[in-house]
Amino acid sequence: DMASLYSQADLVLARAGATSMAELSVMGLPAVLIPYPYAADDHQAKNAEYYVAGGGAVMYRESELDAELLGKILSQLLGDIDKLKQMALAMKNMGQPDATRRILDSCMDLVGIKR
């Protein structure tokens, strides 16, 4: 149950797939993102860049990291509660918890069905 695990997290280390990013933003979880380097058209990096620009995440390319550097990055962020709070708020502000309804409404509008 990812929701219960997310509720216990202060910071998430993740790839940057669309579903993961949607979940993290709705939950308001700051993230260290390492986009999958072989994703089609580098779309995970583009996803990550959006959340970095919004202040909810930091991004590193896999080729830039080793275990020591990753440990330093995580320790630094986990040691800065104010930064984590700012990132969490930014991430939450980017979330779209009503996305399913909005998509459904758009589809119904396209086919002329009024609800």
Image (cartoon, helix red, strand yellow):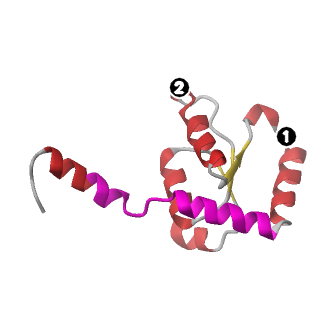
Which element carries disc 2, helix, strand or loop? helix
Which element carries disc 1, helix, strand or loop? loop
Direction from residue 75 to residue 12 in the image, left or right: left
- Give the residue at x 80% y 70%: 81
State the image coordinates of residue 52 (x, y, percent, origin top left): 66, 47
Is residue 98 covered in magenta?
yes
Q: Range of the magenta residues?
A: 81-103
> Could you classify mark 1 by the number of other residues whose Cα lies within 10 Å: few (under 14), some (14-19), or many (20 or more)?
few
- Give the residue at x 37% y 63%: 98
Which is more foreground, mark 2 or mark 1?
2
> In this view, which residue lies farthest toward the top?
41
Instruction: Name the kind of residue labelled 1 in the image.
Output: Asp
Instruction: Name the kind of residue labelled 2 in the image.
Output: Asp
- Give the residue at x 58% y 65%: 28
The residue that mark 2 highlights is: 41
The residue that mark 1 highlights is: 66
State the image coordinates of residue 107 (x, y, percent, origin top left): 20, 48
Residue 101 lies in quadrant:
bottom left
